[in-house]
Image (spheres, helix red, strand yellow):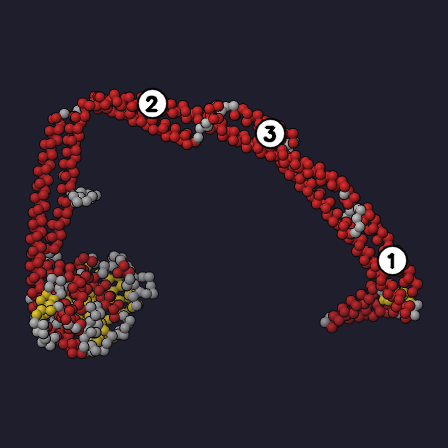
């Protein structure tokens, strides 16, 4: 089946901004075959995606496919401008996915379209562009995917039906079938499983079931009314028994509640009594300990006035005096040994003052006025050595006198320390300190006991605590008198009380239910309107509904027969399509396979078989032939399907490096075939290879 070319659509250029890796790029397509060449990862596949987005994506929508194409360096979406030529007229298609703008303008015909549906219909008219799914399964061949045309079987099949059954209108048997199936589904909805909105058939079945239920209820009611009066007496007896049992259980429950209250109060009183008893015993124990400590303190009364700090200070004074005594004795020995009657020493105050002035005099090197300190230094020395007011002379007699005085003072001070030891009955300082430490420890323990006693009494006296203990003992006797002898022998347990609660609730519920049932049975007996005439009227209505259900069933069967007929028509339509594709493929098979294959049979899933002279029969290419030969077959098959679908409209074909598996000879034959097809197709190829230089105009990116 061939068509005369009467329409054509020619894509002249595309401009994309903010699209994946492209910030802003314009690419022209100057010939029927344009080769877009560039290294891998340079943007060839991105440009192919931009063409598909420009032709088929709706900028007013926001979905994953649209969002994934935004620029890598921007959160804003992209814009695409496509310049198209149609029958000599200039057409511009503009889509801005960020601002949701959409415009197709035919400047030659003064025509503007701004809705996606109108633009989609116009592109279908001028370029046979039906929808994205069909385009990608036929006119767009991704890398190394020539044979994947069978994945688009559903879209291609539906398009062929539209073409062969309705002269290209957007109505097909597939749509009619869907409409019929929708009607049948709507009628049968809810017959096989639960549905929120049941169909007509399920509603009638539900109405019949309700009427049957109502009829059966009336019949049952007629049979039951006679026995209800007799049953009323049984229910009345059950009611009175439940009331009596409930009252008895309530009385027992209340008696037990009194016992549990008394037991709980006794528990609290016993706890208070035990606490007070423990306090009384503890206070007695504290009082005994206090008496013992006071006795021990009285025995150590002498050490109470001992002051450790004064003791240490006096020892320090004795040490200083002993050092001075030793110095005087040494000086006396030296003067005696030297045979000198006296020794001259500078007074310590003068010596210190002279040294300070001498050191400060060095500051004069930084500040001249400070040299005055040297004068003061010289005056001090003159005062010390010339006038001898800064000197002191020690004689042997004077040193001996001073030493005797110091020795006497030391002896007096040591006798005072010995007296303190005797007064405390100890032999030495270590024993005295131990005795003082024991005294202090006893004092602290007495303070701790008195503090504990005060905390326990809390502003009360010991007599008050004993009186409170006695009062709690009396309350225990009073509360225990409230418990009966039977309860003392066999006290109620909490589980029994819980069991009584359950029994009371059970009998109360049974009494209420029995009462309601008595009232209901009595009311039913008085007000029952069930009669045979009401039953007959319902049965008549059921017969009418059954007849209505039968009519709906016949309608469903008629629609099912129509569906079968349409399916059969679809099969015949696909058969015509297969024959047209086979005829087209035979035209080019001899050329591309160098005369080895010319017989082909297309199957329903758009796969095919070819005649093999070697096998003497039809073979499946995928099972017997090389990948290069298989790709040759599917290349022809794609153009065969497109030629059939386009119905004489020249359309766009995108090939993303589809011949990478072809050897040199196959590529030559493929090139010749593509050139022969340029009157029906505009072909844009994307490749990184230099092998396609002579195929058409090469555009580098």
Assign the C terminus to one quadrant of the image.
bottom left
Q: In this image, 678 relative to 308: left or right?
A: left
User: Could you tell me if residue 25 is visible in this image?
Assistant: yes
Classify mark 3: helix, strand or loop: helix
Question: SS for tag 2?
Answer: helix
Along the line of sight, the residue nearer the viewer: 612 or 39: 612
Estimate the spatial distance between the alpha carbons at disc 1 and disc 3, rounded to whole Å.
Answer: 72 Å
From the top left corner, tell me how far across and down residue 539 is, in percent.
11, 32
Measured as percent of width and height from the top left, residue 390 is found at 86, 65
Left or right of residue 505: residue 133: left
The quarter of the picture where residue 227 lies is: top left
Give the residue at x 13% y 64%. Answer: 606
Who's the residue at 23% across and 78% down the image? 690
Which of the two discs, 1 and 3, labels the residue nearer the N terminus?
1
In this orientation, which residue lies closer to the viewer: 592 or 228?
228
Instruction: Residue 608 in the image: state x and y as whole percent.
Output: 12, 66
Q: Marks 2 and 1, how far apart in space?
A: 116 Å
Mark 1 or mark 3: which is in front?
A: 3
Which residue is identified by label 2? 243
Residue shown at 17% from the left, 28% from the top: 220
> Which of the labelled discs sits on residue 406, or is there none?
1
Residue at position x 36%, y 28% in the image = 503
Spatial CA distance of label 2 from label 3 is 49 Å
Assign a secondary structure to mark 1. helix
Q: Nearer the viewer, residue 214 or 185?
A: 214
Of badges 2 and 1, the one in the foreground is 2
**Which residue is identified by label 3?**
469
């Amino acid at each position: 089946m061939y068509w005369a070319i009467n329409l054509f659509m020619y894509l002249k250029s595309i401009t994309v901004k903010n699209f994946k890796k492209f910030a802003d790029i314009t690419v022209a397509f100057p010939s029927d075959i344009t080769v877009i060449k560039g290294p891998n990862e340079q943007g060839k596949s991105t440009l192919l995606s931009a063409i598909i987005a420009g032709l088929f994506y709706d900028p007013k929508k926001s979905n994953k496919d649209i969002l994934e194409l935004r620029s890598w360096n921007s959160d804003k979406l992209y814009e695409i401008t496509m310049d198209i030529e149609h029958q000599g007229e200039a057409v511009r298609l503009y889509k801005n996915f960020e601002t949701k703008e959409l415009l197709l303008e035919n400047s030659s015909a003064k025509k503007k379209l701004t809705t996606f549906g109108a633009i989609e219909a116009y592109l279908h008219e001028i370029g046979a562009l039906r929808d994205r799914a069909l385009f990608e399964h036929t006119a767009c061949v991704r890398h190394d995917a020539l044979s994947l045309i069978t994945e688009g079987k559903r879209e291609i099949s539906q398009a062929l039906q539209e073409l062969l059954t309705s002269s290209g209108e957007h109505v097909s048997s597939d749509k009619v079938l869907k409409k019929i199936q929708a009607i049948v589904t709507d009628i049968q909805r809810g017959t096989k499983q639960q549905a929120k909105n049941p169909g007509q058939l399920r509603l009638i079945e539900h109405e019949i079931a309700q009427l049957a239920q109502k009829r059966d209820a009336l019949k049952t009611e007629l049979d039951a009314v006679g026995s209800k009066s007799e049953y009323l007496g049984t229910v009345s007896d059950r009611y009175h028994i439940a009331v009596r049992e409930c009252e008895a259980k309530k009385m027992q429950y209340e008696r037990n509640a009194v016992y549990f209250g008394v037991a709980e109060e006794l528990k609290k009183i016993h706890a208070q009594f035990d606490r007070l008893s423990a306090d009384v015993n503890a206070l007695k124990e504290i009082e005994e300990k206090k008496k013992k400590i006071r006795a021990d303190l009285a025995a150590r009364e002498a050490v109470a006035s001992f002051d450790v700090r004064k003791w240490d200070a006096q020892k320090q004074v004795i040490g200083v005096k002993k050092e001075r005594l030793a110095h005087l004795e040494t000086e006396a020995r030296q003067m005696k040994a030297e045979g000198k009657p006296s020794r001259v020493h500078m007074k310590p105050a003068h010596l210190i003052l002279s040294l300070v002035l001498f050191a400060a005099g060095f500051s004069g090197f930084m500040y001249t006025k400070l040299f005055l300190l040297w004068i003061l230094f010289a005056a001090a020395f003159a005062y010390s050595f010339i006038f001898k007011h800064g000197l002191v002379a020690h004689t042997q007699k004077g040193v001996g006198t001073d030493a005797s005085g110091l020795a006497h003072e030391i002896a007096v001070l040591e006798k005072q320390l010995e007296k303190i030891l005797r007064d405390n009955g100890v032999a030495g300082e270590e024993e005295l300190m131990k005795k003082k430490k024991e005294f202090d420890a006893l004092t602290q323990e007495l303070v701790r006991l008195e503090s504990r006693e005060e905390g326990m009494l809390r502003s009360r006296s010991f007599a008050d605590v004993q009186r409170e203990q006695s009062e709690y003992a009396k309350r225990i006797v009073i509360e225990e008198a409230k418990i009966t002898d039977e309860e003392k022998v066999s006290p109620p347990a909490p589980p029994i009380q819980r069991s009584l609660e359950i029994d009371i609730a059970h009998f109360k519920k049974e009494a209420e239910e029995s009462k309601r049932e008595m009232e209901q049975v009595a009311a039913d007996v008085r007000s029952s309107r069930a009669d045979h005439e009401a039953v007959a009227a319902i049965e008549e209505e059921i017969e009418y509904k059954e007849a209505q259900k039968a009519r709906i069933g016949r309608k469903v069967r008629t629609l099912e027969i129509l569906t079968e007929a349409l399916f059969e028509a679809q099969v015949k339509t696909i058969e015509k399509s297969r024959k047209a594709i086979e005829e087209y493929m035979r035209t080019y098979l001899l050329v591309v396979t160098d005369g080895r294959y010319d017989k082909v049979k297309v199957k329903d899933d758009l796969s095919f078989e070819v005649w093999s002279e070697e096998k003497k029969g039809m073979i499946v290419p995928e099972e017997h032939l090389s990948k290069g030969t298989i790709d040759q077959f599917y290349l022809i098959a794609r153009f065969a399907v497109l030629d059939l679908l386009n119905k004489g409209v020249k359309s766009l074909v995108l090939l993303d490096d589809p011949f990478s598996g072809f050897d040199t000879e196959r590529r030559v034959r493929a090139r010749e075939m593509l050139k022969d097809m340029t009157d029906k197709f505009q072909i844009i190829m994307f490749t990184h290879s230099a092998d396609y230089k002579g195929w058409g105009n090469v555009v580098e990116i």
